[in-house]
Image (cartoon, helix red, strand yellow):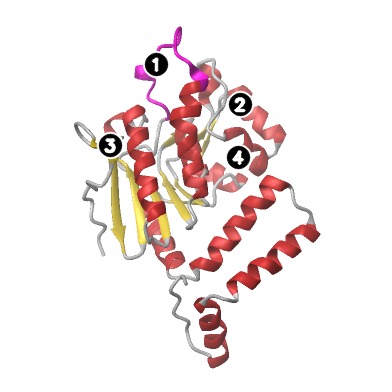
């Protein structure tokens, strides 16, 4: 089925309707919610209003009954980063801009309980890189350009980039990318393990949406337990014994779900399971 591209009127800023054209759209296909960066004429660069709309959209998804979330973008680029046209370098508070406007977005994506899938075409830089890599699974098109071009503008890599790069590429490649300002192509990012998979641009949305639909039809309560455990391992640097104990506890939680009984029952009956996420 086709995705509807209606913009949700439930998105508002500070409780009042946003003025002017919305730069974030929301669609729903079955049990998959999709949040769409929709400022294509600016390569989806994020200004304060767009950041507020995006945070509101993520909160709508988090409070709803969707079983997976897709993060996509219209146009030739996923997100070129913060909209620097409004920057005032001599008197702006760069720390506050990140702490108050942008960092809540990355945390909101990371903390959503459902699986999250990003589809990245063209540039994903700075804030755009942070939005994509905060998702659980990232598909990129062959046109993708990811990395930290900040060497050229005197800035520090932000948006969680240090963590994502060190975790996925290692300290040595992280510092090479930062020092050089070089961007990775879609194929190179997939080859290096920075993202999950690179596909031709004209297959990107279809691939990401098909994967999201497949995931949403799975045992999403069990997936949520795995997602929390993976995040806890990262946060608490758990050793094998701690992971084994946490897995046992999570399995105990999963065993009390309807999907657990359905999955094992279907295996025993040699039939396909039908999962409900409960």
Mark 2–mark 3 distance (CA, rounded to whole Å): 30 Å
Mark toward the start of the polypeptide (2 vs 3): 3
Where disc 4 sits, the SS reads: helix
Q: Is residue 84 magenta?
A: yes
Q: Residue 70 location, x and y as percent?
A: 40, 53
The residue under the point 49% across, 39% down is 106
Front residue of 242 and 83: 242
Part of the protein shown in magenta: 81-95
The circle drawn on residue 124 is none
Mark 3–mark 4 distance (CA, rounded to whole Å): 27 Å
**Badge 2 is on which residue?**
178
Q: Residue 123 location, x and y as percent?
A: 43, 35
- Label 4, residues with CA under 10 Å away: few <14, some 14-19, many ≥20: some
Mark 4–mark 1 distance (CA, rounded to whole Å): 26 Å
- Dots 4, 1 in contact, CB < 8 A: no
The residue furthest front is 15
The circle drawn on residue 23 is 3
Residue depth check, mark 1 versus mark 2: number of the one nearer the observer? 1
The secondary structure that most of the magenta stretch takes on is loop
Mark toward the start of the polypeptide (4 vs 1): 1
Front residue of 225 and 138: 225
The circle drawn on residue 164 is 4
Q: Is residue 132 magenta?
A: no
**Side of 161 relative to 6 (left or right):** right
Where disc 2 sits, the SS reads: helix
- Dots 2, 3 in contact, CB < 8 A: no
The residue furthest bottom is 269
The residue under the point 60% across, 76% down is 255
Mark toward the start of the polypeptide (1 vs 2): 1
């Amino acid at each position: 089925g086709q995705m509807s591209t209606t913009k949700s009127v439930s998105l508002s800023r500070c409780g009042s309707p946003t003025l002017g054209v919305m730069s974030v759209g929301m669609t729903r296909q079955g049990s998959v919610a999709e949040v769409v960066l929709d400022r294509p004429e600016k390569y989806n660069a994020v200004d304060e209003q767009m950041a507020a709309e995006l945070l509101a959209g993520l909160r709508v998804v988090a409070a709803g009954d969707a079983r997976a979330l897709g993060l996509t973008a219209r146009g030739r680029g996923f997100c070129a980063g913060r909209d620097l046209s409004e920057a005032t370098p001599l008197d702006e508070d760069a720390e506050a801009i990140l702490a108050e406007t942008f960092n809540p977005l990355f945390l909101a994506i990371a903390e959503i309980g459902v699986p999250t899938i990003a589809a990245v075409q063209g540039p994903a830089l700075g804030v755009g890189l942070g939005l994509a890599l905060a998702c659980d699974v990232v598909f990129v098109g062959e046109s993708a350009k990811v990395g930290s071009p900040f060497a050229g503008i005197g800035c520090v890599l932000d948006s969680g980039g240090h963590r994502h790069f060190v975790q996925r590429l290692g300290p040595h490649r992280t510092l090479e990318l930062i020092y050089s300002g070089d961007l990775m192509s879609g194929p190179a990012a997939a080859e290096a393990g920075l993202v999950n998979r690179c596909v031709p641009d004209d297959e990107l949305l279809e691939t990401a949406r098909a994967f999201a639909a497949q995931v949403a039809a799975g045992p999403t309560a069990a997936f949520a337990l795995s997602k929390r455990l993976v995040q806890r391992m990262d946060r608490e640097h758990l050793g094998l014994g701690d992971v084994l104990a946490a897995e046992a506890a999570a399995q105990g939680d999963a065993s009390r779900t309807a999907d657990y009984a359905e999955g094992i029952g279907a295996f025993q009956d040699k039939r396909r399971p039908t999962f409900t996420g409960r």
